[in-house]
Amino acid sequence: MKLETSAPRDIQNKLEPLQDGRFRFDCHPGVPCFTECCRDLRLILTPYDLLRLKNHLRLTSSELIARHLELKPDESSGLPQAFLAMQDNPRRTCPFVAAEGCRIYADRPSACRTYPLARATRKHAVHGLVLEAYYVLHEDHCRGFEQDRIFDTDQWVADQGLVDYHEMNNLWMEIVTHRALKQRPLTAQQMQMVYLAAYDLDRFRQFVFGSRFLEKFAVAEEDLAAARDRDDGLLKLAFRWLRFTLFHDPVLGLSNA
Ligand code: SF4
Ligand code: SF4
């Protein structure tokens, strides 16, 4: 959970500890740098970010991928990563930024909500709870640090609507940080499974309800109802299927077991 060394190199020297668990910050249309940060980003998106985005934009997951994403495998593990494609203009602006702010504000991605914090997580080896640590990511162009509001991390998480994001992103992190990925990179076929289940949720729905998936896997009635009725329920099933098929984690049963 040492974010100072595990974070991308370009931000490692911008990370600062919180002071007494708090930080001074505010962002609103009155700051002189308003929307200046919404450009030239290497903005990684989680599967839950994609779910929220596709529903906000009323796109299918395949359309969202085609219009707005760059998918690339991680160099060492092969795990596919999703990045928001910046616009092809000299400033490389985010496709969703406008003079009045973020056009998808209600469903903006986790990273946009979390800034100016950076969050590191790990799962406790004994009790399995997710442990988290926060840092302030202090970028020189950001004038939000000159504002008067003071937050602690719980207040920031609530203020930015991050509770649901953290619940779903913690499940994704169990895959991203899985020890098996450190031992053996994914095969091309396994990468396709991740593309399908994590990023192309509407196609994964067809796979679950339009193939022999439910003959093969024993899915509890309530989990099946959640997957049928809600995208977050379907994504939770997708994560379990990935852990079972990629890593043999016992989180999904076989029907004839
Ligand atoms: S640079 Fe900082 S204060 Fe300015 S708009 Fe971005 S987050 Fe807000
Ligand atoms: S999604 Fe919204 S908040 Fe995030 S970079 Fe784009 S315009 Fe800014």
Image: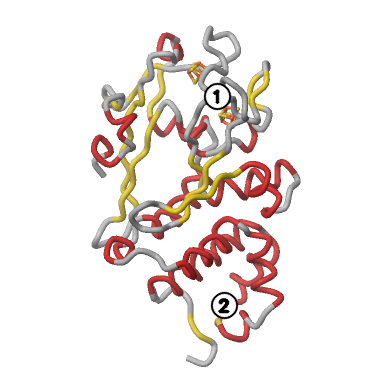
Q: Neighbour class for label 1 at 10 Å: few (<14), some, many (≥20)?
A: many
Camera-nearest residue between 196 and 73: 73
- For ligand 2, tell me if the residue under mark 1 lies within 8 Å: yes
- Distance from disc 2 to disc 1, alpha carbons, whole Å, reads 41 Å
**Residue matched to label 2:** 219
Asked whether the beta carbons under mark 2 and mark 1 sit within 8 Å of each other, the answer is no
Q: Residue at x 24, y 60 (%)?
A: 125
Quadrant where the N terminus sits is top left
Q: Neighbour class for label 2 at 10 Å: few (<14), some, many (≥20)?
A: some
Q: Residue 118, located in which quarter of the rendered image?
A: top left
- Compared across the picture, whether 111 is left or right of 140 comes to right
Q: Residue at x 43, y 13 (%)?
A: 141
**Residue matched to label 1:** 38
Q: Position of residue 7 (x, y in %)?
A: 31, 38
Question: Dot 1: what SS?
Answer: loop
Look at label 1 and name its amino acid.
Answer: Cys
Look at label 2 and name its amino acid.
Answer: Val
Q: Position of residue 11 (x, y in %)?
A: 33, 29
Q: Earlier in the sequence, mark 2 or mark 1?
A: 1
Q: Residue 4, located in which quarter of the rendered image?
A: top left
Q: Residue at x 58, y 32 (%)?
A: 86
- Compared across the picture, whether 26 is left or right of 196 comes to left
Number of the front mark, 2 or 1: 1
Q: Residue at x 56, y 39 (%)?
A: 84
- Here the colouring is secondary structure
